[in-house]
Image (cartoon, grey):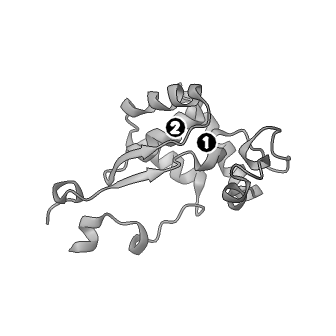
Amino acid sequence: MPTSRELGISQIVWSPVAQGILTGKYKPGTPAPEGSRARDEKGGADMIKRFLNDEVLTAVQGLLPIAEELGLTPAQLAVAWVLSNDNVAGAIIGASRPEQVTENVKAAGITLDADVKARIDEVLGEIPETDAALTQSPGARLS
């Protein structure tokens, strides 16, 4: 069976830093920072509120040491993780400031080994959707 890439089927992921949640700036049990998207009623507060809970924010804090060990920002780790998926052709980072684009683009050439991906999976636990019927590659769904 051909892979999804051989079939020319892939994804372009929107918001690989989950509206800023994966930057680590939002902390569990703490109000959203002033000037952040979560505080902007015209610029995304509704989009981000589904992630603003202690379970998600605590898990994100657990990713910070992994990013630091790799010499990455948390946002770069998130983008690198998205781009490491074989079914992803690209990511729309949706940065709100030019320096965010500059920093996030550095993730494009980063390779995350299986051990790092396993550590990320362990930290995130059951927060991400992992139901194979919803997440497996298009090629696998076609078989």
Query: Where does residue 71 sit, x and y in percent of width and height?
Result: 53, 24
Instruction: Name the quadrant containing residue 25.
Output: top right
Q: Residues within 10 Å of mark 2 (few under 14, many from 20)?
A: many
Task: Mark 1 vs mark 2: give the one in front.
Answer: 2
The quadrant of the picture occupied by the N terminus is bottom left
The amino acid type of the residue labelled 2 equals: Leu
Q: Left or right? Give the position of 1 relative to 98.
A: left
The reply to whether dot 1 and dot 2 touch (C-beta < 8 Å) is yes
* Residue positioned 56% across, 33% down in the render: 67
Q: Left or right? Give the position of 27 relative to 139.
A: right
Q: In what element is the residue under mark 1?
A: helix
The circle on residue 63 is 1
Q: Residues within 10 Å of mark 1 (few under 14, many from 20)?
A: many
Q: Left or right? Give the position of 97 relative to 90.
A: right
* Residue positioned 79% across, 47% down in the render: 39
Query: Where does residue 116 sit, x and y in percent of width and height?
Result: 46, 41
The amino acid type of the residue labelled 1 equals: Leu
Check disc 2 and report the residue beneath it. Answer: 77
The quadrant of the picture occupied by the C terminus is bottom left
Instruction: Tell me if I can see residue 70 in this picture.
Output: no
